[in-house]
């Protein structure tokens, strides 16, 4: 029987070569001393272990088994000290520990093996975002859709009667709903002789949710009000019955980013129930008001801004409300690289919920009356098309039978048939996994890659038509589609998500500052700043030109009146968002006060946070985490120092400086701005020093005199262009770029530069290149039949 | 002495531990509402006491006469905003005023929702506090043809002030609530084999490395199948009721809807999913057109006709008799259904209360609100006709709570809780 420790190793799949007799006895005697002096685990390994186990632990002639396994560093170390090398003299414990660590990190551990594996396009499931979008689109696509109308407000109809009756109602578009009628009738041109005791208004249209999350809708009114959101039948807020003096109604609803939802607000000034108009005519009219607000995820409540409102009511759309475990983001972007029980349960729950939704609202969702004589036949056709859209390709006769036809036989009720069929479709690997089971690339595969790459959802009808016609083969054909798709709002939704994650503001909690130090900065400021940042992204990256340099350099700052009180710009207090130029020291997104506040402490700026963002996100540099956890030095302990001096002092030690020599000078260039992103020239009665520098990968030293200089460099730097290209690539494609070809990122960067830094064209080029890349290995293992 | 109570079983001849562990019987309360008042002379028995005769409206209760308790002389004293129909239903189970609001009735000032919770919810909250009496739902609110608009006339049950609870009047929706999860699992189970087969096909097309992920996924699907099988073994010990397809919410389908809802209620008792239930027929001012009885007019319209209109009185009597038949059907189903714990049949442990928002339709009186009870859930002395001298109905609401083991000191407006529960019921 082997010793316990040996058994342990054997079980774990590693057994170090024990019968070794290569080394001469003399060597064995002298070596321990030499080892004691050896500096690193790598050197020890290469000197003592590599001859038998191979330079990378891959095994050698004498001992061919690779050194891989799941033992911990401590276990490995103990084993080496006790057993290695063979012969009477064993490795000294400190060296064994070093070797163990080296082996573990370099090739032994599963993590190291993963790291060393050549990049490949691996099977991935839909990410949670992709799953939710796909289910929504799948259900919405069971019937033709129509547009949202024009942006800028809801269609309003004003009626003379208390319940939308009365002659000559007046229609117009209202940009937002916030009305104080007082004791009078609404002052709407063309609406004369209205009894201030009774009138009614209906606002109809669509609202677009910018982000995925829970939205709270708030209706304030002292009259009868009812809000329908994404439902024609069930009000989200029912304040039709006034009872007690509560004038505020709130309700939350989960919405998906980028989707338009039908919204209807009904308002009636009168009593409900029995008409008592005559009786009330003798009385003085009561005052009346109505206001429609929302509270976006993590933002403050506000009247719904007109830019999110559209004049036409879309059909209701399904929202997946199941909670999913978060996707893996360990390598910097969300990807569907793993499955878990929680994920599988969530897909089941979501599939059942969606199937129940369609079955219970059959007519609404499919347009087919489930009680009609030919309902089953029609519904089977709809489900076949649904399966085709879900799987992103036509079904074989066998699949048609399995997923649809066998459920729509006479013995199964219509309701059950819909449920079973849809449940199967949504649980099928053909839906849940990206591009599988394709022996060779064809137009359908290209369509799917374009759709998920640019939109994170299913191919639309036009893509499927092109795929069916086989016209997604040449580069020109694919480019044509990609250029069309990149103009779609869904592409902007995806790009917007990328920008927020690239700038590290996608998952932050509410921005809070010290009320003592910055009394002017409250929740409303934080919320306004966030909107301002999003508007800036929209006006630069989201514009027609979509110019990366604009993003880095724009001096047009979208601010509203409240922000203007703090940051200047000369707007009146109640002004809505508009673009102004804010001071000569601002250029681009990096100098946006939201970014600067986010990358700061409660009271002081943080050059380190700012420098890390520039180094990591914008320049694509790799930074090791700090060797230990450090609390920043308290400003109050060094009242005479500027933040810059304090940070420099704390990061002076050698262990820090290797990274902080890069981080600090990048962040120092932004010291012009304080903890809420306001410009300053002095700190603690000392003049601010905004000089900074950057040592490029090539070794050149670039100096900056301040923020604008820094932004200018980042707008023109090759390193920044390549980093942006690569990060965008991974966000879109969710596979390692190296898996396609080693030169792909540099090719894409070159085209980015050539195309006037158009981010949208870069997106299009990225999906064109990956969907046509020949690198994918044939998925099918050659069988005997295929070999013939 | 020095002997603690916990030690007593060991030294005296008290019941054994297993007998002590027996749970108390499952007491249940059902409240049935029908609208627009009754016809007093065909409803109230002429006699008081155990020897009484059921009149035309109450004839369907003949088989349960010795389990029936008829309470005359109980009145809704709550005043304030709102017309009598509104207060009639809104204060019926809450015993408290309506908030001022914007709902204008046929008379009086406009009002809103009730300013307190209803007695069924009070009892539910009490039962849900103890693991002995806690059930999956605590209470279920059934309805039959309740109009789709939410206003003071259509809501009887309140979770709290300004918190009306909408009854579920679609039996399919109620079925989904009761059995949806089980149905979902059945659907899931029916597709799992096919799904796994197709998964295997997909797998055969993948590279060895990619197969690992799908293998992992496939094992998760197998785990789910096992979980479903395990949970099916633990399922409630009764058959899931068969639902006939396509009974639409339609006036003419009221008899079918009523039967379906009553059957579902009994099923929910068998599963012990709830011990409190309400069943609301239409609404206050309800306009059921009972064409199946040969009556073309709406009930509310008929109820406004004067006592001198003999035809209207006859029709109203027929209408109330129909509601009484529904009550009798429920009692019959309960009496036929044995308790799973061996404590007799369900009617032995359930009290069904049938009530109305008005004493009489044409006068809109809130005096002599009909309260007819059947069954022995509350330990009242049954088989009687009782006449009180206009006692406030808050005291009856308290009696219901006391009967369900929840001895509250007041309920709703304290001014009407006088000397506590109604005298002489238990």
Image (tube, coloured by chain):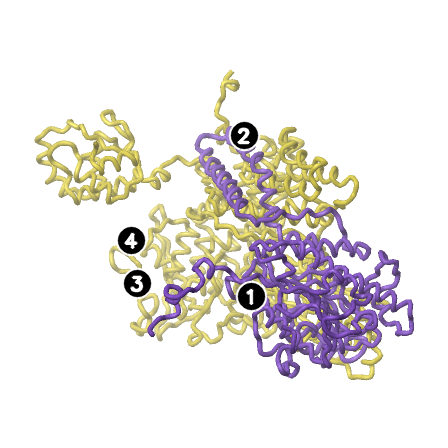
Chain colours: A yellow, B purple
- SS for tag 4? helix
User: Which disc number belongs to residue B127?
Assistant: 1
- SS for tag 2? helix
Residue at numbered disc 4:
A658
Q: Are marks 3 and 2 on the same chain?
A: no
Q: Which of the two residues, B181 or B244, is positioned nearer the viewer here?
A: B244
Q: Which of the two residues, A657 or A105, is positioned nearer the viewer here?
A: A105
Alpha carbons under labels 3 and 2: distance apart: 62 Å
Q: How many marks?
A: 4
User: Marks 2 and 1: in contact by CB < 8 Å?
Assistant: no
- The image shows residue A117 at horizontal and vertical percentages of 38, 36
Choose mark 3 or mark 2, whichever is in front: 2
Alpha carbons under labels 3 and 1: distance apart: 66 Å
Q: Residue at x 59, y 47 (%)?
A: B182
Residue at numbered disc 2:
B201
- The image shows residue B103 at horizontal and vertical percentages of 75, 74
Would you identify the image quadrant in which residue B39 lies? bottom right
Choose mark 3 or mark 1, whichever is in front: 1
Q: Is residue A158 left or right of residue A429?
A: right
Alpha carbons under labels 1 and 4: distance apart: 67 Å
- SS for tag 3? helix
**Crowding at mark 2 (Cα within 10 Å: few <14, some 14-19, many 20+):** few
- SS for tag 1? helix
User: Which disc number belongs to residue A648?
Assistant: 3
Chain letter of mark 3 equals A
Choose mark 1 or mark 2, whichever is in front: 1
As displayed, is residue A767 above or below residue A608?
A: above
Q: Are marks 4 and 3 on the same chain?
A: yes
């Amino acid at each position: 029987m082997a010793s316990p420790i040996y058994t342990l190793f054997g079980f774990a799949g590693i057994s170090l070569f024990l019968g070794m007799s290569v080394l001469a006895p003399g060597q064995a005697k002298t070596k321990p001393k030499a080892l004691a002096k050896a500096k690193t685990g790598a050197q020890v390994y290469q000197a003592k272990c590599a001859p038998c186990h191979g330079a990378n632990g891959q095994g050698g002639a004498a001992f061919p088994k690779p050194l891989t396994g799941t033992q911990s560093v401590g276990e490995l170390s103990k084993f080496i000290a006790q057993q290695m090398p063979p012969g009477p003299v064993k490795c000294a414990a400190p060296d064994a520990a070093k070797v163990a660590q080296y082996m573990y990190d370099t090739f032994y551990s599963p993590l190291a093996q993963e790291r060393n594996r050549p990049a490949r396009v691996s099977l991935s499931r839909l990410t949670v975002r992709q799953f939710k979008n796909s289910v929504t689109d799948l259900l919405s696509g069971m019937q033709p859709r129509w547009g949202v109308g024009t942006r800028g407000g809801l269609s309003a109809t004003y009626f003379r009667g208390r319940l939308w009756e009365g002659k000559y109602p007046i229609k117009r578009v209202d940009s937002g709903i916030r009305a104080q009628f007082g004791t009078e009738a609404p002052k709407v041109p063309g609406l004369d002789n209205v009894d201030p005791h009774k009138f009614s208004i209906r606002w109809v249209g669509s609202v677009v949710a910018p982000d995925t999350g829970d939205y709270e809708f708030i209706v304030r009114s002292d009259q009868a009000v009812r809000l329908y959101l994404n439902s024609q039948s069930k009000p989200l807020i029912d304040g039709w019955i006034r009872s007690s003096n509560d004038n505020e109604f709130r309700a939350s609803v989960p919405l998906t980013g980028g989707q338009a939802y039908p919204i209807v607000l009904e308002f009636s000034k009168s009593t409900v129930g029995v008409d008592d108009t005559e009786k009330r005519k003798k009385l003085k009219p009561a005052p009346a008001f109505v206001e429609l607000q929302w509270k976006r995820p993590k933002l403050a409540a506000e009247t719904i801004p007109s830019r999110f409102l559209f004049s036409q009511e879309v059909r209701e759309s399904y929202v997946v409300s199941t909670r999913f475990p978060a996707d893996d983001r360990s390598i910097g972007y969300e990807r569907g690289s793993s499955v878990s029980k929680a994920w599988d349960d969530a897909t089941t729950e979501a599939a059942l919920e969606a199937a129940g939704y369609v079955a219970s609202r059959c007519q609404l969702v499919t347009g087919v009356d489930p009680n009609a004589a030919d309902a089953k036949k029609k519904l089977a056709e709809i489900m076949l098309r649904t399966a085709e859209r879900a799987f992103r390709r036509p079904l074989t006769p066998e699949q048609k039978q399995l997923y649809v036809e066998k459920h729509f036989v006479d013995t199964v009720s219509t309701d059950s048939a819909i449920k079973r069929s849809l449940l199967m479709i949504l649980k099928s690997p053909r839906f849940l996994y990206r591009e599988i089971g394709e022996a060779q690339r064809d137009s359908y595969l290209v369509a799917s890659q374009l759709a998920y790459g640019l939109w994170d959802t299913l191919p639309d009808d036009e893509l499927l038509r092109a795929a069916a016609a086989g016209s997604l083969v040449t580069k020109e054909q694919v480019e044509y589609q990609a250029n069309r798709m990149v103009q779609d709002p869904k592409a902007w939704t995806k790009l917007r998500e990328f920008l927020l994650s690239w700038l590290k503001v996608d998952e932050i909690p509410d921005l809070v500052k010290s009320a003592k130090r910055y009394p002017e900065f409250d929740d409303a400021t934080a919320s306004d700043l966030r909107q301002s940042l999003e508007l800036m992204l929209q006006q630069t990256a989201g514009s027609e030109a979509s110019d990366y340099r604009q993003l880095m350099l724009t001096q047009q700052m979208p601010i509203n009146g409240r922000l203007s009180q703090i940051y200047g710009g000369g707007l009146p207090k109640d002004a809505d968002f508009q673009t102004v130029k804010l001071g000569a020291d601002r250029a681009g997104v990096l100098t946006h006060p939201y970014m600067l506040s986010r990358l700061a402490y409660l009271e002081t700026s943080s050059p380190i946070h700012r420098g890390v963002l520039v180094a990591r996100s914008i320049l694509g540099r790799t930074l090791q985490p700090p060797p230990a956890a450090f609390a920043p030095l308290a400003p109050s302990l060094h009242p005479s120092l500027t933040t810059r001096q304090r940070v420099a002092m704390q990061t002076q030690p050698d262990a820090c400086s290797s990274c902080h020599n890069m981080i600090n000078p990048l962040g120092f260039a932004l010291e012009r701005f304080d903890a809420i992103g306001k410009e300053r020239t002095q700190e603690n009665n000392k003049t601010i020093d905004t000089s900074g520098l950057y040592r490029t990968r090539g070794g050149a030293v670039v100096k900056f005199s301040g923020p604008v200089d820094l932004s200018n460099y980042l707008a023109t730097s090759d390193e920044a262009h390549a980093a942006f290209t690569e990060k965008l690539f991974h966000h879109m494609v969710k596979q390692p770029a190296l898996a396609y070809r080693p030169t792909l990122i540099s090719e894409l960067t070159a085209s980015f530069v050539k195309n006037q830094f158009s981010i949208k064209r870069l997106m299009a080029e990225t999906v064109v290149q990956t969907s046509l890349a020949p690198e994918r290995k044939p998925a099918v293992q050659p069988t005997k039949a295929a070999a013939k | 002495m020095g002997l603690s109570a916990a030690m007593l079983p060991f030294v005296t001849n008290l019941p054994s531990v297993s007998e002590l562990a027996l749970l108390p019987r499952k007491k249940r309360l059902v409240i049935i509402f029908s609208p627009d008042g009754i016809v007093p002379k065909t409803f109230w028995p002429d006699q008081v006491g155990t020897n009484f005769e059921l009149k035309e409206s109450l004839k369907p209760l003949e088989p349960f006469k010795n389990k029936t308790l008829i309470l005359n002389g109980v009145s809704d004293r709550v005043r304030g905003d709102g017309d009598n129909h509104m207060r009639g239903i809104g204060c019926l189970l809450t015993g408290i005023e309506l908030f001022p609001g914007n709902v204008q009735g046929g008379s009086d000032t406009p009002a809103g929702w009730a300013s307190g919770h209803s007695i069924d919810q009070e009892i539910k909250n009490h039962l849900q506090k103890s693991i002995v009496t806690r059930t999956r739902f605590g209470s279920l609110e059934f309805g039959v043809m309740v109009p789709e608009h939410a206003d003071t006339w259509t809501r009887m049950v309140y979770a709290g002030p300004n918190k009306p609870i909408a009854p579920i009047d679609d039996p399919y929706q109620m079925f989904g609530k009761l059995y949806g999860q089980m149905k979902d699992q059945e659907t899931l189970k029916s597709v799992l084999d096919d799904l796994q087969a197709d998964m295997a096909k997909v797998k055969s097309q993948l590279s060895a490395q990619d197969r690992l992920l799908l293998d992992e996924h496939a094992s998760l699907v197998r785990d789910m199948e096992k979980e479903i099988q395990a949970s099916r073994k633990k399922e409630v010990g009764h058959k899931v009721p068969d639902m006939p397809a396509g009974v639409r919410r339609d006036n003419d389908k009221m008899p079918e809807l009523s039967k379906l809802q009553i059957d579902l209620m009994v099923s929910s008792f068998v599963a012990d999913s709830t011990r409190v239930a309400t069943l609301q027929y239409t609404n206050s001012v309800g306009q059921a057109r009972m064409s199946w009885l040969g009556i073309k007019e709406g009930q509310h319209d008929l109820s406004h006709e004067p006592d001198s209109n003999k035809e209207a009185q006859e029709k109203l009597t027929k209408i109330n008799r129909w509601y009484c038949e529904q009550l009798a059907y429920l009692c019959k189903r309960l009496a036929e259904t044995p308790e799973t714990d061996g404590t007799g049949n369900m009617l032995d442990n359930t009290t069904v209360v049938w009530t109305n928002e008005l004493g009489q339709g044409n006068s809109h009186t809130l005096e002599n609100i009909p309260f007819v009870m059947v069954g022995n859930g509350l330990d009242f002395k049954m088989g009687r006709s009782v006449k009180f001298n206009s006692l406030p109905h808050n005291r009856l609401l308290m009696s219901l709570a006391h009967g369900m083991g929840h001895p509250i000191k007041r309920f709703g407006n304290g001014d009407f809780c006088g000397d506590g529960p109604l005298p002489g019921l238990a």
